Image (cartoon, rainbow, N blue to C red):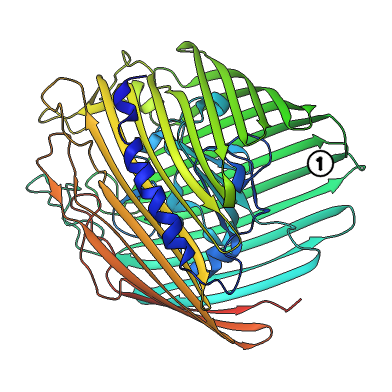
Amino acid sequence: METSMLRPLSTAVAAALFLPLLASTARADSAAVDLDEVVVTGTRTEVPLVDSLVPAQVIDRAAIERSQARDLIELLRGRAGVDIGNTGGRGKLSSLYLRGAESDHVLVLVDGVKFGSATAGMPAIQDLPVAQIERIEIIRGPRSSLYGSEAIGGVIQIFTRGGEADGLSPYATVGGGSHGSRDASAGFDYRGERGWIGAHGGYDSTDGINACRGSGTLFQGCFADEPDDDGYRNVSLNLRGGFRINDATTLEGNFLNAAGDNEFDGSWTNRSKTLQQVTGAQLRYAPEGGRIGLSAALGRSKDQSDDYQGDAFVSSLDTRRDSASVQADVKLAAAHSLSVGVDYSNDRVDGTTGYTVDDRDNTGVFLAYSGSAGRHRFQASVRNDDNEQFGNHLTGGLGWGLSFDNGLRLNATLGTGFKAPTFNDLYYPGSESPWLQPEESRSLNLGLSQFSERFHWSFDVYESRIDNLIVFVYPPPDFLGVGSNIDEARIRGAELTFGTSFAGFDLSTQLSHVDPRDRSGGANDGNVLARRARSTGRVDLDREFGPLRAGITVQGAGSRYDNAANTARLGGYATTDLRLEYAFHRDWSLLARASNVFDREYETVAWYYQPGREYHVVLRWRPAR
């Protein structure tokens, strides 16, 4: 690893020395941190969040409801390491950049099942309804040594709702607001002595905004003159349940179905009917006090799109990702454990578009160790992926943590990753690039953090080097592009998070800075990678006043470039959202939200509008327990 990757450490130390002083000024009236909260995504086993050596964040159901976010874009935007590009509002194609990596460098799991398009390689986060989400874990930094391809920038795992609370827990909501938005949801969870089940349904629609300011005559933006509102509708169903066969063995399953109808501006197609579907089953054997735990899982993720020009059918695309895994967890000693497992996946493409290759397999074998000795914690993992098209790829990860008094800890992690080219990269008709090679990365993270019952903070600096980064060039009049592997990209960054409760207020602050550079030595050498804002941030402040809760979110991003040549610059922005929640009855609440209250005009992708000032009101029924 190059010594330049160690340069940001002095900055981290200086900031970390200041942060405890800042935190100590907070007078906490309630717990700011759940010290018993666990994460599973960073290690594939349960680890307390406070002991995670990799930078991690958890967004639970309470935080989702408190934010009143209407989709994943609103919920994730501005969080540590996260930047999002959106093409015109609700339901429109969105790209998620984690730590400056490409949008297809983020592995998204839904209840342990790999989620996303096998052709585009990126998850349709705009189609995952927040009404069906119980919890989100965000892991920043490479995890290919545990999950294989796509986990260069990090992993986001979404856990759907189902059977979380003892007894019966029903609820229902109905709402509406600006741009003809209408939504409703209803469901229940039930957990008995040996089994649990949850069923949740949702409906969400909007008349939308004019998505694109492009021009068909001037060949700009979306290459179409369609100054109309572009609506979106999403109908979702989520089922999840399980049964404890005996004291050591549980069987559970999950099913998520989200059907969308999306209007947009375009000269070839301007409407798409989409389907996102995730099905999974898990069998676990974990005897209490035993030294060995076993688990087996089957999963299928489906991404389907039928495209239209008006009411005229144009094309269809159906991708399917099937997966199977077996994992054994062994307790070597009181503070040492070992995990070993095998993953198998198959990606398949079907539809009206012909691909030269439309099917491929991947088999991965991994080994992971976790342990502690005194104040020291250690992690190590190694994985080999045998890809049907690209052969074997070996990735690894190392982690070390040193704990000090008062919950302060120093962390260092090193990891490598790889990303196989997608079917679109290689074989999309008109832009075939079968010569592309897998992308490979190596990353270093140094961090300081502190967790207590009153507050928590973390400061991380990192550097990633990505070899063979895939980019597409668009020589006129070619609008599809031709792929190429640039020699290298270098990404440096820093992230600060801080949270506390004081004087009845709950405060969360997240700031990020990233410097993603092209280091190919070509015409764009030294340029910032396209569509990433170098600085992003988010502040959430909430307070309860008896039956009333009020909150404000301020989030924003600095400027970015929309192209690799850095000639198309998009200005930075900041938006402010206000929210109120009033429990006027023990079972009933009224929620009101005003977003982008100062009506800020901005774009995260050139030519594509973002919503201005919007209002939304929701009535919620949830019997008190």
Where does the image place residue 503, in percent across and percent down from the top left?
Answer: 51, 78
Extreme residue toward the right, this view: 246
Residue 17 shows in the view: yes
**Relative depth, front residue between 285 and 442:** 442
Left or right of residue 330: residue 244: right
Residue 148 spot, x, y in % from top left: 52, 25
Q: Quadrant of the N terminus?
A: top left
Q: Which residue is identified by label 1?
A: 251
| Residue 482 sits in quarter | top left
- Residue 255 vs residue 410: left or right? right
Task: Judge whether 355 appears above or below 527 on screen.
Answer: above
Amino acid tagged 1: Leu
> Farthest residue in the left direction?
218
| Residue 116: image location, x then y, percent | 48, 38
Camera-side residue of 36 and 74: 36
Counting from the top left corner in percent of width and height, residue 594 is at: 37, 77
Which residue sits furthest top? 391
Question: Against 46, is 266 above or below?
Answer: below
What element does badge 1 sit on? strand
Q: Residue at x 50, y 19 (%)?
A: 395
Q: Tell me the residue at 22%/53% (across/down).
A: 558
